[in-house]
Structure formats: C-alpha cells, structure tokens
Amino acid sequence: MADYHFVYKDVEGATTQWDDIQRRLGNLPEKPPAFKPPDFVPRVDADEQPKSKEWLDEREADELEELEDDLEDDRFLEQYRRMRLAELREAAKTARFGTIQMITGSDFVREVSQAPPDVWVVVFLYKDAIPECGLLHTCLEELATKYAETKFVKIISTDCIPNYPDRNVPTILVYNNSAVKGTYVGLQKFGGKKCTPESVALALCQSDPVLNDGQGGGDSSRNNVIEVVRRKFIEKVVAQHEAREDEDDSD
C-alpha cells in the first residue's frame, strides 16, 4: 500500500508562535510583507473624458469645429464651443499684421505714408553688417508678433534715405496718419546693447499709443501696454537677479 504524505500550507503571511519567538530572538529573518496587488485603475480614453469649459479653452479652431457632433447633448458646452470658436475667428480676422514686412524705397509711400489713419507704422532702418541692427531686429520681431494691430516694416537705411550715415543705424521712425510721430536713432533710448523687447516697447509708447494688440485703442490701450511691459520687465530683472544669486551660492 502506497504511503501518502500531505504538506500543510497555511494562509500566505501567517506564522507560527514558534517562528515569532525565533524572530524576536534574532534567529530568523524578518517576515516579508504579504503580497498586495496594486490598486486597479481603469484606463481612461482621452476621447471619452468629460468636456469642460477649461478643456475647450485649450482647443484650437479646427478642433472646436470637429467637436460639433460630440457636444450636441450638452447645451451649455455646445453654446460655449460656438462662442469660443467665434472669438478665435474674430481674433484671426482682426490680426492685420503680426510680422515685420520687408519693403523697398518704391514701397514706402504705399506701405507707410498711405497707411490707414488708425494704423501706427514702425519703420526699422537697418544694415545687415551692423550688429546693433540684429539686436534691435530680434526685439521688434517679438513686438510685431504680440502687437499684431501695429504695422512693422523694415527697409535698408540707404534705400529709405540716400546716403544715410551708418553711424545713425539702426533707426526707428514711427508714422501715423502720414506724419512722423517719433524718431529713435541708435539704441540709447532702448537701453543700449542690453535692450529688450520690453524696453523698446516702453520707449515707443511713452507719448503715443503706438503698440496695439487689438484689445483696445487710444490712451487706455497705451496705458495697458505700458503696465504689462513694466510688469514683465520687473519679472525678468528679478529672475535674472535670482539666477545670479543661485550661481554665487553654487560657487
């Protein structure tokens, strides 16, 4: 007759009184923790997530158009989607410029002198071989993108004014309603070689509402621009100061 041997296996993690005594005496290693499977987290499909006002604010115009069928059951979100889409379309429609346009001497009258009375034109006279021109050009590119209702043009200095001396380059001319409203020779009024988009914006808006982002006009717009630029300028200075302090501490 065959012998049958049974091996008893207790519940995982359970121990005997003898084992507990031996562990207290240091004769056995610590009991390993009982296995615990990770909590189940269902996979969420991004397309099935509930839509919210904040979620719609992050969508582009083409994405909002594709959501028309998905939001039919939610009257509020569908109404908000339409409103948001209208805002984006209006913003795209009102942004007249947004870049620095290259012009020649023959374009000057049409593009600058004959610009509509409600448009301020910033004319950038430059020469490629002059380093200061590259520095100011970088600043103006950022301003042209941000203030798309202001027209920015650039022209080689001697194409605009024959025999214009290189020592006066870069130069900025500000036009409105066919008249010169401001002249800036060199970088001195913009902070010299440390000029930034913020310092250029402050100088341009000191007396006239030159910069316009399409959110308003007149003195209120000029004051808003100055306030925003000042705040960003202060934030940038503080960030640079903190960075220098961190470098000093690391040394």
Image (cartoon, rainbow, N blue to C red):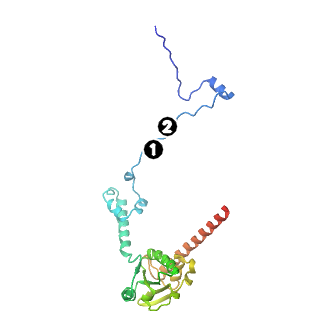
Q: Residue at x 50, y 17 (%)?
A: 6
Which residue type does callout 2 highlight?
A: Pro
Q: Quadrant of residue 116?
A: bottom left
Between the C-alphas of marks 1 and 2, the distance is: 12 Å
Tell me whether circle 1 and circle 2 mark residues in contact (CB < 8 Å): no
- Depth check, front residue: 47 or 6: 6
Q: Is residue 168 left or right of residue 54?
A: right
Quarter of the figure with the C terminus: bottom right
Seen at 35% across and 70% down, the residue is 89
Tell me: residue 8, above or below residue 251: above
Between residue 221 and residue 132, name the one nearer to us: 132
Q: Which disc number belongs to residue 41?
A: 1
**Disc 2 marks which residue?**
37
| Type of amino acid under label 1 | Val
**Closer to us: 195 or 214:** 195
Q: Is 9 drawn above or below residue 197 in the view shown?
A: above
Give left or right: position of 21 versus 116.
right
Which residue is located at x 49 percent, y 37 percent?
37
Q: Residue furthest right?
A: 25
